[in-house]
Image (cartoon, rainbow, N blue to C red):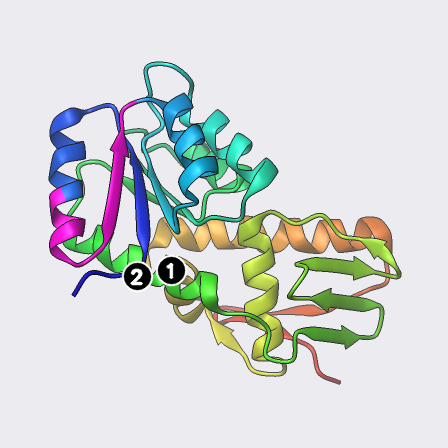
Amino acid sequence: MISEKHILIIEDDKVILKFMKLALETNGYQVTGTDQGSIGLNILINQNPDLILLDLGLPDIDGVQVIEEVRKVKTTPIIVISARGRENDKVLALDSGANDYITKPFNIGEVIARVRVALRNQEQTIENKQFTYKDLFVDSDKRIVKVADQTLHLTPIEYKLLELLIIHQGKVLTHSFIQQKIWGYQTQDDYQSLRVFMASIRKKIHSIKKDSQYILTEVGVGYRFIDE
């Protein structure tokens, strides 16, 4: 049965593009492919795909720029699939708004698994739509976060992390649990990325109200959203 989910692949290697397109279609997804970032952006606006698989090394514009342009208008999940494997490249892409990062060469089964996770996460929202705790306010319908009535500007990954912690308020979430829920897999590299994202969320909160504390670190275990 054909899925209602539409995936856009932006990949300049035509062999890889054809391979991924066939694999995804075999798994029931509708797929559109292009080797140009600019064409991909046009497809995004005109066809509104549910998810984007994006290579960073495109012939016309850099993939990070594509991410930034998408994030100006859409919250569509973006999974980067790139030969750029350095930590800095991953953090830059994720901080620009990508939801996940896969380094080439890749296993197509892993790609499909992460596609499922990203699509499932996109459908998840805070159960009660609005959440208030002390000076923190979250409206999941509008994706608005405020601290002391000031808007908190979070990247898509930071928002998903905060949302996950709120959904499980008071519960210690292990590093592996968080990685599985947000990225769909667990690696030591992404544990370091997780620490960077958590530190960034805290820094942004403290820039508005220094004495606000919502996320506790359980040393060697994970993180917890306070419920005292």
Residue highlighted by disc 1: 119
Q: Verify whether residue 10 appears in magenta.
A: no
Give me the residue at 39% from left, 34% from top: 43
Callout 2 secondary element: helix
Q: Is residue 157 visible?
A: yes
Q: Is residue 27 left or right of residue 142?
A: left
- Which image quarter: residue 212? bottom right
- Residue 45 spot, x, y in % from top left: 48, 36
Q: What is the spatial separation of the Cα atoms under label 1 and label 2, in whole angstroms?
A: 5 Å
Q: Is residue 218 visible?
A: no
Amino acid at pointer 1: Leu
Callout 1 secondary element: helix
Q: Nearer the viewer, residue 189 or 208?
A: 208
Q: Which mark is residue 197?
A: none
Rate crowding at label 2 as few (under 14), some (14 to 19) or many (20 or more) other CA atoms within 10 Å: some
Q: Verify whether residue 32 appears in magenta.
A: yes
Q: Is residue 80 left or right of residue 158?
A: left
Q: Which residues are magenta?
A: 22-35
In which quadrant of the rendered image does the N terminus lie? Answer: bottom left
Amino acid at pointer 2: Arg
Outermost residue on the front side: it is 46
Residue highlighted by disc 2: 116
- Residue 227 spot, x, y in % from top left: 71, 83
Circles 1, 2 touching at the beta carbon (< 8 Å)? yes
Give me the residue at 52% from left, 42% from top: 97
Q: Is residue 150 above or below residue 10?
A: below
